[in-house]
Image: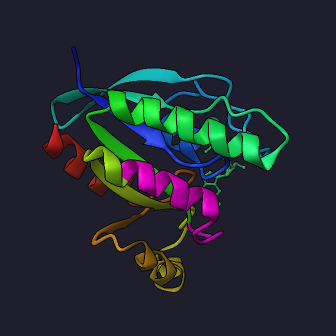
């Protein structure tokens, strides 16, 4: 009965990379091709003496945009419904895409505690350049992180753990 923290976001934003970093092992498949994570992965995490289950969502495999869209929505809705806290990832280098907006709507309707992560901010100086466009989401707090290099992850986990 540990709390669930779900990683959600459209394919290729870096969910599995972040999962792997937090899990400290290579449990999820990371691939440059969108949609290669085949199913959900769960890992027990301990941070600041709080324990929780981290859930990596994925499994989106399709070649039509409409189909991907529908799958993202279904899968996200399910993961969010089960979650106590949601980590929503966006790609700092891509900006806000229509598929991101779909997920944002699901998150708003859910009423869950959501952390908005802007991933792929690999160096501090990139934050000033890449973050501003994401304030269009109307979210007060954005978390610049780099799943690949680890920036911002410790501060984020401090706050996530405090929510549990
Ligand atoms: P998922 O589909 O959301 O699970 O995304 P993945 O974790 O599979 O990552 C998709 C691609 O983004 C891979 O090529 C990763 O190497 C890359 N990626 C993930 N995190 C970062 C990051 O922090 N910085 C950079 N530069 N690339 C990243
Ligand atoms: Mg994945």
On the rendered image, what quadrant is the N terminus found in?
top left
Ligand 2 shows up in which quadrant of the image? top right
Residue 78 is left or right of residue 71, and the answer is left
Foreground residue among 2 and 48: 2
Residue 38 spot, x, y in % from top left: 68, 24
Number of numbered markers: 0
Q: Residue furthest right?
A: 63
- The part of the chain drawn in magenta is 92-107
- Which of the 4 image quarters holds residue 94? bottom right
Instruction: Give above or below for 148 relative to 137.
Output: above
- Which of the 4 image quarters holds residue 112? top left
Q: Is residue 43 magenta?
A: no
Q: Residue furthest top?
A: 1
Residue 107 spot, x, y in % from top left: 38, 50
Foreground residue among 10 and 54: 10
Residue 135 spot, x, y in % from top left: 41, 78
Q: Residue at x 34, y 27 (%)?
A: 82
Instruction: Give above or below for 67 relative to 149.
Output: above
Q: Residue at x 45, y 21 (%)?
A: 42
Residue 159 spot, x, y in % from top left: 21, 51
Instruction: Give above or below for 49 relative to 88.
Output: above
Specify whether residue 23 is in view: no
């Amino acid at each position: 009965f540990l709390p669930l923290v779900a990683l959600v976001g459209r394919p290729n934003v870096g969910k599995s990379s972040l999962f792997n970093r937090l899990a400290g092992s290579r449990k999820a498949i990371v691939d440059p091709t969108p949609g290669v994570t085949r199913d959900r992965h769960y890992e027990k995490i301990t941070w600041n003496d709080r324990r929780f289950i981290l859930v990596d969502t994925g499994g989106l495999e399709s070649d039509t945009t409409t189909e991907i869209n529908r799958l993202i929505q279904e899968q996200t809705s399910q993961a969010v419904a089960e979650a106590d806290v949601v980590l929503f990832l966006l790609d700092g280098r891509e900006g806000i895409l229509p598929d991101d907006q779909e997920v944002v709507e699901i998150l708003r309707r859910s009423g869950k505690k959501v952390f908005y992560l802007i991933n792929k901010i690999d160096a501090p100086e990139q934050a000033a350049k890449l973050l501003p466009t994401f304030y269009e989401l109307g979210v007060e707090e954005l978390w610049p992180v780099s799943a690949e290099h680890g920036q911002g992850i410790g501060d984020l986990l401090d706050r996530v753990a405090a929510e549990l």
